[in-house]
Amino acid sequence: MNSIKFGKLTICLVTVLGRKTYELWHDDKPDALGRFDSFSEARDAAKREENRMNSGDGND
């Protein structure tokens, strides 16, 4: 598995039965925040999540 870390968020490349997807994980959460078909989709979701965390919105 390959991964890229953005603060408390990690994007992981996952391959299952030859199909590649990208999962977004938060260090403090037990489940993936999302699964995406492309790295750019996962990166955009990570940016949105980071902005949400920085704004204090949500229940972290």
Image (cartoon, rainbow, N blue to C red):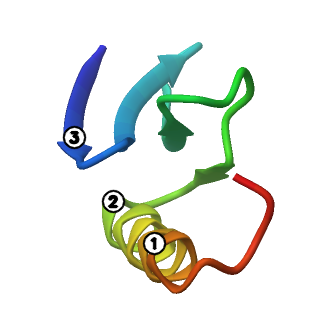
Left or right: where does residue 5 sit relative to residue 35? left
Q: What residue lies at 25% left-to-right and 49% top-to-bottom? A: 7
Q: Residue 39 shows which numbered tag?
A: 2
Name which residue lies at 80% across and 59% down: 59
Residue under the point 72% across and 21% down: 30
In the picture, measured across the screen, residue 27 lies left or right of residue 13, that is right
The kind of residue on which mark 3 rests is Lys
Q: Alpha-carbon neighbours of circle 3 within 10 Å: few (<14), some, or many (≥20)?
A: some
- Asked if the residue at tag 1 contacts the one at tag 2, i.e. Cβ–Cβ closer than 8 Å, the answer is yes
Name the spot of residue 55 as percent of width and height, x first: 53, 86
Give coordinates of residue 25: x percent, y percent: 52, 37
Instruction: Give above or below for 27 relative to 47.
Output: above
Q: Residues within 10 Å of mark 2 (few under 14, many from 20)?
A: some
Of 21 and 17, nearer the camera is 21
**Does dot 3 land on a helix, a strand or a loop?**
strand
Name the residue at the right extreme. 59
Residue 1 locus on image (x, y percent): 30, 14
Residue at 74% x, 28% y is 31
